[in-house]
Amino acid sequence: MNEGQLIQQVLSGDASAFSYFVDQYQHMGITIAYRVVGNMQDAEDVVQESYIKVFRNLHSFRKDSRFSSWFYRIVYNTAISTTELKIWHDEMPVESLEMASTSEFDTEAKMCEIENSETVEYVLSKMSKGDALLLTLFYLEDNSIKEIASIMGLNIPNVKVRLHRARLLFKHLWTKNFDVPTF
């Protein structure tokens, strides 16, 4: 059964069909919320509140987009509204990151090769919440730039620039914190 049919079941009164969406999207929802709010308890609360919002507003879901993008956007907005923190702040000036020294392919290939999730999580924790969330959505969740723009309420060029800067910062922090060759 596809998601459209499950949505119709929920809208027809079969609330148990909603469990598919909870099972399918809860993990990434918590990841997004955690990146914004900074602790697991609040992240779980954000996701629970988001599911309530989704359930109550499922009738307004436009089926021309992916349910996951719509849900992640609700999680993101809920997380932002529960925190006073600004998610975009630069740890260091962008000029110091050697803009021309890396390509998107090189960074993507290396991130895909890194299998130690604790190490990746450590580096992501040293970045701004927004940068860490961008990299998580793009590389770990395989969302497109268009989907990320929709989730985070940014325009596509802004996502591209921020993603490029986040890649550079990830590279810098990786080489700064771990004794590995530059990738």
Image (cartoon, rainbow, N blue to C red):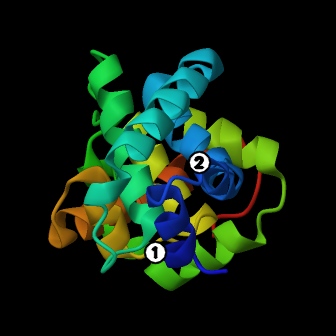
Amino acid under disc 2: Ala
Instruction: Using a 10 Å C-alpha cutoff, classify the residue at mark 2 as few (fewer than 14 neighbours), some (14 to 19) or many (20 or more).
Output: few
Q: Nearer the viewer, residue 54 or 126?
A: 54
SS class, disc 2: helix
Q: Tell me if residue 89 comes above or below residue 138 in the rendering.
A: above
Pinpoint residue 8: horizontal percent, then vertical percent: 47, 68
In terms of image quadrants, where is residue 112?
Answer: bottom right
Q: Tell me if residue 21 comes above or below residue 78 in the rendering.
A: below
Please give the name of the residue rendered at 35% of the width and 44% of the height, measured from the top-left corner: 74
Q: Nearer the viewer, residue 172 or 123?
A: 123
Furthest-right residue in this view: 116
Q: Which mark is residue 4?
A: none
The answer for how far apart the CA atoms under marks 2 and 1 are is: 49 Å
SS class, disc 1: loop
Q: Nearer the viewer, residue 10 or 137?
A: 10
Amino acid under disc 1: Thr
Q: Is residue 112 left or right of residue 90?
A: right
Q: Is residue 37 left or right of residue 44?
A: left
| Visible residue check, residue 10 | yes
In terms of image quadrants, where is residue 9?
Answer: bottom right
Q: Quadrant of the C terminus?
A: bottom right
- Residue at mark 2: 15
Q: How many numbered circles are shown?
A: 2
Q: Is residue 30 left or right of residue 101?
A: right
- Residue at mark 1: 102
In terms of image quadrants, where is residue 148?
Answer: bottom left
